[in-house]
Amino acid sequence: MAYKSANLISLFIQIHGLGTALKILFSGKFDGMDPAGRDLTHANKSKFQLQRSEIVALMNAFGR
């Protein structure tokens, strides 16, 4: 039973990591940048932040 519980926790962390990756991808924060990293939009967008649990889940998802 403990093995099944560990698998469920691992699955939850992976799903949370993929959700964080999608959040970054669809945030629109990087839409107005050129390859050199300069901002092209001059629009005042809201501040993009990730929570600590999202960063941990993202690193764990990429680690698997």
Image: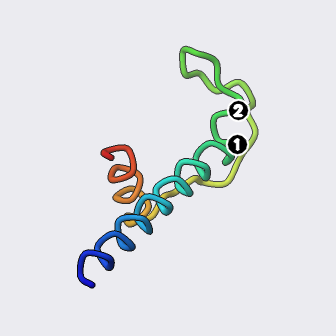
Q: Is residue 44 left or right of residue 60?
A: right
Is disc 2 surrounded by few (<14), some (14 to 19) or many (20+) residues within 10 Å? few
The location of residue 52, given as percent across then percent down, is 37, 64
Residue in view at x 46 percent, y 56 percent: 17
9 shown above or below 31: below
Residue in view at x 49 percent, y 63 percent: 16
The location of residue 63, given as percent across then percent down, is 31, 45
Instruction: Decide which of 11, 58 is in the foreground and name it.
Output: 11
Circle 2/circle 1 CB separation < 8 Å = yes
The location of residue 64, given as percent across then percent down, is 33, 46
Q: From this viewpoint, which residue is outermost toward the left?
A: 2
Q: Which residue is under mark 1?
A: 28
Q: From this viewpoint, which residue is outermost toward the top?
A: 36
Residue in view at x 36 percent, y 72 percent: 9
Query: What's the distance in space between the residues labelled 2 and 1, CA to CA?
Result: 5 Å
35 shown above or below 30: above
